[in-house]
Amino acid sequence: MIVQNLPVPLDRRVWLECRTLAGAGYDVTVICPKGPGDPSFEVIDGIAIHKYRPAPPTTGFVSYVWEFGYSWARTAVLSAKVWREHHFSVMQACNPPDTYWLLARLWRSRGVRFVFDQHDLNPELFESRFGKPKRFRDRAQYYALRWLEQMTYRTADMVISTNESYRAIAMGRGERAAEDVVVVRSGPETHRMRPLEPDPALVRDPRKTLVYLGIMGPQDGVDQVLVVMHELVHRRGRTDVRAVLMGFGDCYDDLRAICTRLDLDDCVTFTGRADLDMIADELSLADVGVCPDLKSPLNDVSTMNKTMEYMAYALPSVAFDLVETRVSGGDTVLYVPSGDVSGFADQVERLLDDDDLRRSMGRDARRRVVDELDWRAQTGPYLSVFERLTGGPSAVAEPTGRVFSWLAAVPEEATCDHRGRPYATLVDRAPVPAPSVVEEPFVERATADEVLLEDILLDGPPSTSTFERSLV
């Protein structure tokens, strides 16, 4: 299993895939970058994890090329080390980036099959961050990404897509046959991800809490949470609301600076990198989840894991209206046309001020994610990919004697998590339908949000970061 974007087991989807394979009897090894304080090698739940020191943070095209080349070389060396220790039959690469097809071709001579687990659409990511390429240099970079993606599609024995939108692209511009592309959604483990009762030893902030969970990159729209908070606190005068932002990414430092400039430091908390216990605690205490991803070529067709994670913790949420967010959230999310910050704040206030609506939508969200989106429903399609390529674990390795029981559902009567924290009791309520909005066409660049943020920051110091300039 090759991952470059995040360390494992921090990458939840990849870790679920690893444990699914191990639980089915496969021997699994992961190659990925180190996180802070990580060792070079460790074994967790019987899964061997080899880690390399990540490249320094990138700031431009040349440094991106260096990062990809460096990571590719370190991964290639570690793959040879793994081969010496234990021959492998299948290599799965999770993008971004789309560069490991070449490594797969090198290992093909040893009979290794290649699975492409497509987490992102890199050409759409480029368009979402920089717009349609017009200059020669930008077009060259864009078509280089298209070529790398095409080579990955061509090299893969099987393609795993996170949703039907990605699958359609794999079969369209990827020219893959329908039987070679399998949808495996990033559903949460709802028997483990469940709301907890408040810890009586902790004093809870009496204010209502908005929560964001996820990566903080330019395409993720986290700045929109700050704009909404500015609207609620400084324009509407609400003193009963706060926000907790969990995660990290390229824009983390810029977001903190913008938060200070908007005079929101006393009502916005940045946690940085969040482990599973912190996520459980914060999502259990929060009142409303926020999905601030603006409509873009990438976001509109991407599944947002945070939406389903909010749902697992019976948390209602507000989102800008995106195609795949509707597929995940259904009627358990309040949708707002992309770019309508005032409308977003209106829907947040609606949930904050209506306890019955908030609790009813939270219960419906929990029911939907358990019944339709749980990871256990994805294990069958996922394992079918490897059974097709290998004939099953017994055909590629001798039994190890290890027993994995995690795939068995935790009994519904389980009352506590691994720390002894009691799970909350969810009281059933009659469903309350969420309002629908009229679909609006995608506006490629300028949005009302950008104008609003420009107005808010107008009185700030004259020097602004690249990230802030891209927003205004």
Image (tube, rainbow, N blue to C red):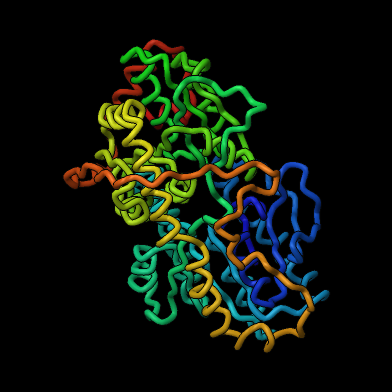
Q: Where is residue 299 in the image (x, y as percent from the top left)?
A: 37, 49
Query: With respect to residue 1, does 34 lie above or below?
Result: above
User: In the image, what residue occupies the spot 50% across and 77% down?
Assistant: 158
Which quadrant of the figure contains the C terminus? Answer: top left
Q: Nearer the viewer, residue 393 or 68?
A: 393
Q: Quarter-wise, where is residue 288 in the image?
A: top left
Q: Where is residue 307 in the image (x, y as percent from the top left)?
A: 42, 47
The percent coordinates of residue 431 (x first, y second) are 29, 47
Q: Quadrant of the N terminus?
A: bottom right
Q: As drawn, is 140 to the left or to the right of 95?
A: left
> Which residue appears at 57% of the width and 37% of the height?
197
At 64% across and 47% down in the image, what residue appears? 416
User: Which of 195 and 329 lies nearest the eye of the viewer?
Assistant: 195
Is residue 37 shown to the viewer in this render? Answer: yes
Residue 137 seen in this snapshot: no
Number of numbered discs overlaid on the protein picture: 0
Farthest left residue? 438
Which residue is painted at 46% across and 31% down in the image? 467
Q: Is residue 416 above or below residue 17?
A: above
Give the image location of residue 241, x and y in percent. 43, 21
Direction from residue 455 to residue 69 in the image, left or right: right
**In this picture, is 19 found above or below 367?**
below
Which residue is the extreme one toward the right?
Answer: 85
